[in-house]
Image (spheres, coloured by chain):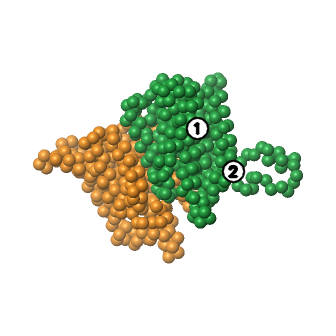
Chain colours: A orange, B green
Amino acid sequence: MTTFFQQLINGISIGSVYALMAVGYSLVYSIMNFSNFAHGGVIMLGAYMGFFALAVGNLPFPVAMILATLGSALLAIVLERIAYNPLRKRNAPYLYFIISAMGASIFLENLVIAIIGPNFKTYPKVFEKEPFLIGTLALGRLDVMMFIISAVSLTALLFIIEKTKTGMAIKATAYNLRASALMGVNTDHIIFIVFGLGGGLAGIAGVLFGMKYTVYPQIGFITTKAFIAAVFGGLGSLSGAVLGAILLGVIETITAGYFSSQLRDLIAFALLIFILVVRPMGIMGKQNEDKA
Amino acid sequence: MDWYYVEGILILSGINLLAVLGLSLLTGFTGLFSFGHAGFMAIGAYTTAFCTMTLGLNFYLALVIGGLMAGIMSLIIGKLTLNLKGDYFIIATLGFGEAIRLILDNMQYFGGARGWPGITNHTSLMNVIVINIIGIVILVNIISSKHGRNMKAIREEEMASNIIGIDVFKYKLKSLWISAMYAGVSGGLLAHYIGFLQPKMFQMIKSTELTIIVIFGGLGSVTGSVIGAIALTALPEVLRNVKEWRLVIYGATVVLIMITRPQGLMGGKEFRPIQYLKKWFGKKNKPTAEQEV
């Protein structure tokens, strides 16, 4: 039973980081209606920014975290201006957005390989190794911090979306872009903010993943997990993305703990196909004729 | 540059081309995107290699079996997921492609993640060219048949085609099935050219590469796919002396094409030598085939 709870806790901790990625991805999807496959590139660069701030700049952890967050937000905004904005101006079909995102993702990944190199890099030690002990359960300090940082970031996002005027505009734009533009919402501005928010969360996720594992140019591949989580919870729904991400994290760690870690990714993809076949709108997704 | 090197690039272009032709039918003519065609290639590659190496079958028979196997898989996956729209279908194909790779990673019988070495070499420039010509002829005939016209109708306006009585699901499934068979045969050729199979060869990036070639050549143009496959397989080779920067250039080029010339190289037009000759030497004022696209 201890093992089960141990895996459950690890799963929730990993799942909360998946949630950071899935929310950013879902946010962009809800407004622009396309899968931002370049999200992984932003996460990867966020992880590198955090690494350089800590290992080369010798900055304290909170400063490094803020730098990586702002840097990733800026990167996501620039990416939107260069790769998506011209398409949006022309009302291009969403397929072009996806290909453009793919191109941007290949570009970012290989730019890092060309400039920094393909090697794995290990974050300097930020938190002590010895875990908190609650009875027989051992909570890794890093895992606890991952959960806390993710929860705080998600709460902040939720506050922006639910309580501020900008948030209301984001919700309106997600509901219907053209109508909210007619009602006086500056949709250009909203898309700018949404990419900034998504990019910032991606940066935080990148730093947390870098600390948990290592940093390498292909780390962006982890975003496929975010896609799965977002589909699992219902594309375009933020609370769904969070729930889907945490469930995915728990399912993964329990598979790895009880069966084999080799099967972990296979289970994740099998789950994806299963969800799409059985309930394409996801757990929390709204029934939408256009999408599913 | 010796001939052996050039021949190698041409064979690889030809192998890519065959998969791209299939994907061109699905993406360019039916309007469905797939990020899982590397999975169909993997099924074709492993099935073909199993038939020649373990069962000792003839290479061409094995290629047909490999193609059929990929086709059967596509029917199963298509039945399940073709009702999904837009991004949902793309994510489903992505999940399928990755699942196939992970299953192969765990199949110790085929060497698992370490790979399967020592597959005999049967692929030559000659048979790649012949198979590609057969592939192009079949594809062009499908596109200009009733089936192809229905697929194009679905690409343009799905709901309207449904209303005028086209069985949208059936034609989508057909398109996916044919494209998966092309990918399967292409995988079989690849296995018997490289002589070594590893699930890593069929990652999502391979599927993306195929889709990028189709877009680069121009959606809805077979000529574009042919030129795109040869140009984009050769491009990284030409850029080989800039080493790791070549994929950076590749990625930037893709974005640049999307924002400047999204209709691709050929933009839905075809190169039709016979009709050009007729146009230049024959009677004037006759409607030509290019206009219908």
- Which residue is drawn at the image coordinates 38% and 34% (left, top)? B107
- Which residue is drawn at the image coordinates 62% and 24% (left, top)? B4
Q: Residue B274 appears at what percent x and percent y?
A: 79, 44
Marker disc for residue B208: none
Q: Residue A62 appears at what percent x and percent y?
A: 30, 52
At mark 1, the secondary structure is helix
Can residue B91 be seen in this snapshot? no
Q: What is the three-letter code of the residue carrying label 1?
A: Asn
Q: Chain of mark 2?
A: B
- Which residue is drawn at the image coordinates 61% and 27% (left, top)? B124
At mark 2, the secondary structure is helix
Image vertical order of residue A2 relative to residue A120, above or below: below
Q: What residue sits right under mark 2 in the picture?
A: B144
Query: Crowdedness of circle 2 by 10 Å Cα count: few (<14), some, many (20+)?
Result: few
- Count all numbered tags in the image, as a single digit: 2
Observer-nearest residue: A77 or B23?
B23
Whether pointer 1 and pointer 2 mark residues with C-beta atoms closer than 8 Å, the reply is: no
Measure the alpha-carbon separation of dots 1 and 2: 23 Å
In this rendering, position of residue B228 left or right of residue B82? right
Q: Residue A179 appears at what percent x and percent y?
A: 51, 73
Q: Establish whether labels 1 and 2 are both on one chain.
A: yes
Observer-nearest residue: A123 or B276?
B276
Q: What residue sits right under mark 1 in the picture?
A: B16
Observer-nearest residue: A41 or B172?
B172
In this rendering, position of residue A147 left or right of residue B128? left
